[in-house]
Amino acid sequence: MEFLAVNLPHFGSWIGDGFDRILSVPGLQSVVTFLLLLTILVFVHEFGHYYVARRNGVKIDVFSIGFGPELFGWYDRAGTRWKFSAIPLGGYVKMFGDADATSVVGDTSQSMTPEELAVSFHGKTLAQRAAVVAAGPIANFVFAIIIFTGIFATVGQPYAPPVIGDIEPGSAAEQSGLKAGDRFLSIDGAGVSRFEELQQAVILNTGRNMALVIARDGQEIAVNVTPHLTETTDRFGNVHRMPMLGVKRNGVDYVRLGPPQAFLHAVRETWDLSAGGLTALGQIISGQRSSDELSGPLGIAKMSGEVAEGGIISILGFAALISVNLGLINLFPVPVLDGGHLLFYAAEALRGKPLGPRAQEYGYRFGLALVLMLMVLATWNDLVHMKVIQFFKGLITL
């Protein structure tokens, strides 16, 4: 019921400063770290489905980390087969009565005894089935909130006041009259309390005007500025055109928060990451942002190895970012993904009966094709970013 997420751009600017100091590492470390993180995140996602299903009396046939042939596994006392499979790019929970891992109703569902129907997934009420499906993505969001809460309460939350430390010559900020020492009060009507919020707003800008309110010498001043699209080189050596104001902050502090505050800030961080990811994806779909910014399994694996060099906090932060990503991707209303199941259930609620088998079959085919195309595009981007495509082009043109 779950596929490896495609990494959306610009997640977690608060952890980006640490990434810039990370050195390149051997490929083996990247693979090991990636597989470890992926296993944990897939387990969290699938355990969300499993736990809510069991709480609603559903019998679970298989709990799998990975797809394809089984490598090893075992049965628990409830008869569930827990296993690790050969293709470690996702996982699934197969429930009693399912035809396959996508929770398509089996051909035998109509001939089940009342006792069998009572423990089958498709024998449950619409609300119960929706809760089981939604539990996977929700588990990913909860997991991210737990990680962020722990980081903010122990190491601290990255914080820089929204004050300009320096301005780059010729930048959009200089041309609009901004000065060092100006404090940002709001951006497009939204209040600003951290420099990181300004960064996120600028990164998601696609060349439109931004209405700023700043404080200077005790006065509030309204400023309109349009970020310049500037070529930047990321930590992997890839060149991107990014919107830039051209302002710098005065360093960054880590503020430790009490448990209640840490939790509230963790919820907000998770919400902001989700909203920012959806905005960026919408910009890619509408053509306002390049699809080159999408990353797939290879890109995430490379990042995993580099993040590992930053220590346990960097690894945990990265795990939280990918967990949010995983939850978001699986909520998209695409058949095969959890969001597609929820879409079918919404249609069932409106119609008073499920969609016909043929409609569901075509929906799943379309969804699978769409997911595969997205994965191919993201993997192609990874190969381009890693200079693999350039390498083979060089061989051909020799």
Image: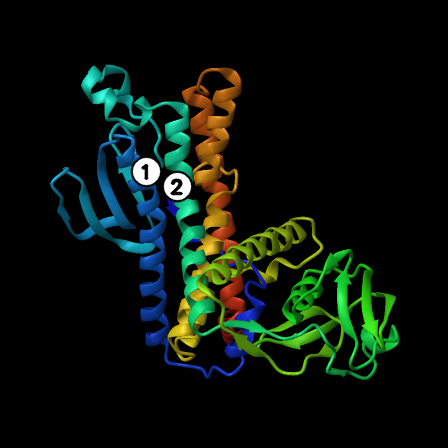
User: Which x, y percent locates residue 96?
Assistant: 24, 30
What residue is shown at x 36% (from left), y 66% (from top)?
A: 34
Number of the label disc, if any, that sits on residue 52: 1
The three-letter code of the residue at mark 1 reads: Val
What residue is shown at x 19% (from left), y 19% (from top)?
A: 115
Q: Between 116 and 358, which is closer to the camera in this rendering?
A: 116
In the figure, 129 relative to 279: above or below? above
User: Which x, y percent locates residue 174?
Assistant: 84, 78
Which quadrant: the N terminus? top left
- Judge the density around disc 2: few (<14), some (14-19), many (≥20) Cα neighbours within 10 Å: many
Q: Between 307 and 28, which is closer to the camera in this rendering?
A: 307
The answer, for residue 59, to whether it is visible in the render is yes
What residue is shown at x 28% (from left), y 16% (from top)?
A: 110
Q: Answer with the quarter of the image where residue 390 lies.
A: bottom right
User: Which x, y percent locates residue 259?
Assistant: 44, 62
CB-based contact (under 8 Å), mark 1 and mark 2: yes
The three-letter code of the residue at mark 2 reads: Ala
Number of the label disc, if any, that sits on residue 19: none
Q: CA distance from mark 1 to mark 2?
A: 7 Å
- Judge the density around disc 1: few (<14), some (14-19), many (≥20) Cα neighbours within 10 Å: some
Which quadrant: the C terminus? bottom right
Q: Is residue 371 left or right of residue 88?
A: right
Q: Secondary structure at mark 1?
A: helix
In the figure, 11 relative to 19: above or below? above
Q: Answer with the quarter of the image where residue 134 lies.
A: top left
The answer, for residue 398, to whether it is visible in the render is no
Residue at image mark 2: 135
Question: Closer to the N terminus: mark 1 or mark 2?
Answer: 1
What residue is shown at x 64% (from left), y 52% (from top)?
A: 279
